[in-house]
C-alpha cells in the first residue's frame, strides 16, 4: 500500500482490537504529534508560503482527528494519559538523519518524506482496523473508514510537497523508496502492541 515495502501482519488488528482503550489513547497521541510536526515545519519555513499553508491545513485536520478521538476516549470513561515513546517514529527519523545530506533543504525533504511514510503506515493499519471493526459491527468502524481516507490524502500531500521543495521528482521518489525500505525493516520488528505503529 502506497510506498510500504512490508505489509502489516493482519493479526496486528486482532491485537489492537483486543485492547481498544490502549489503541485509542495511542492513536490520539499520534494525531497530536502529526499536527505538532506539521505546525513546526510550517513555522520553520515561512519563506515557502505554499508549503506553510499546506502544512497548516494538514495540522488542522490532524487536530480534528485528535478532537474526535478525545471525544471517544471521554465517552468511554478513559484517560488520555501521557504519550508513550514512539519507537517506530524515532527509529524512522534516526534512519533518515543517518543517511541525509547535511543541508537544511535536504532535511526538510526528509522530514516531509518521513511524515508521508508514517501516514502511509497509519493508512494501512486504519484499513485493517476499519475492516476488523466493521466485521464486529462496532460503532467506531465509520471513524476508522474516514481516517483511512484521510491518511492516504496526507501521504499524497506530503510526498507532493517534498517533490515541490526538491524540484526533482525522480530524486525525491528515489529517496522515498530508500526511506520506505528502512521503514519496512523497522516495522518488521514491531507490530505486536495495541498501538498504531507498535
Image (tube, rainbow, N blue to C red):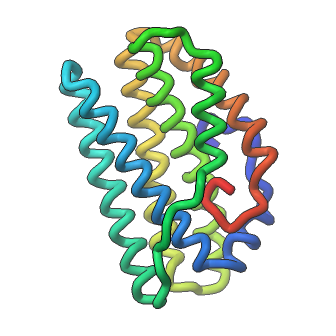
Q: Is residue 135 left or right of residue 75?
A: right
Q: Which quadrant would the C terminus be assigned to in this image?
A: bottom right
Number of marks: 0
- Taking the spot 49% from the left edge, 56% from the top edge, the residue there is 30
102 shown above or below 130: above
Q: Residue at x 45, y 80 (%)?
A: 73
Q: Position of residue 100 (x, y in %)?
A: 57, 15
Within the image, what quadrant is residue 103 found in? top left
Front in this rendered view, residue 94 or 70: 94
User: Residue 48 vs residue 177: left or right?
Assistant: left
Left or right of 111: which side holds 176?
right
Measured from the top left, where is residue 50 in percent x and y?
Answer: 22, 27
Between 158 and 39, the one lying in front of the other is 39
Q: What x and y, as percent, mark residue 157?
A: 39, 36
Foreground of the two, 81 or 156: 81
In the picture, measured across the screen, residue 193 lies left or right of residue 98, that is right
Q: Nearer the viewer, residue 122 or 197?
A: 197
Q: Residue at x 59, y 86 (%)?
A: 137
**Looking at the image, which residue is at 27% across and 36% down?**
54
User: In the displayed structure, would residue 138 be above or below residue 186?
Assistant: below
| Quadrant location, the N terminus | top right
Whole-percent x and y of residue 192? 78, 61
Task: Please tell me whether residue 96 is drawn above or below residue 6 in the rendered image.
Answer: above
Amino acid at each position: 500500500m502506497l510506498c510500504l515495502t512490508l505489509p502489516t501482519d493482519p493479526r496486528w488488528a486482532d491485537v489492537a482490537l483486543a485492547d481498544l482503550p490502549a489503541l485509542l489513547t495511542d492513536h490520539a497521541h499520534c494525531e497530536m504529534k502529526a499536527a505538532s510536526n506539521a505546525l513546526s515545519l510550517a513555522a520553520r519555513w515561512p519563506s515557502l508560503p505554499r508549503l506553510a499553508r499546506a502544512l497548516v491545513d494538514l495540522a488542522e485536520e490532524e487536530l480534528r482527528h485528535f478532537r474526535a478521538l478525545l471525544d471517544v476516549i471521554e465517552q468511554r470513561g478513559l484517560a488520555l494519559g501521557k504519550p508513550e515513546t514512539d519507537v517506530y517514529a524515532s527509529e524512522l527519523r534516526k534512519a533518515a538523519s543517518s543517511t541525509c545530506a547535511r543541508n537544511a533543504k535536504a532535511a526538510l525533504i526528509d522530514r516531509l518524506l518521513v511524515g508521508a511514510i508514517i501516514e502511509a503506515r497509519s493508512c494501512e493499519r486504519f484499513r485493517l482496523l476499519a475492516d476488523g471493526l466493521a466485521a464486529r459491527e462496532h460503532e467506531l468502524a465509520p471513524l476508522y473508514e474516514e481516517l483511512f481516507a484521510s491518511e492516504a490524502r496526507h501521504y499524497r500531500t506530503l510526498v507532493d510537497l517534498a517533490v515541490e521543495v526538491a524540484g526533482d521528482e525522480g530524486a525525491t521518489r528515489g529517496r522515498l523508496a530508500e526511506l520506505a525500505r528502512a521503514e519496512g525493516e523497522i516495522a518488521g520488528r514491531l507490530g505486536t502492541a495495541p498501538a498504531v505503529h507498535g
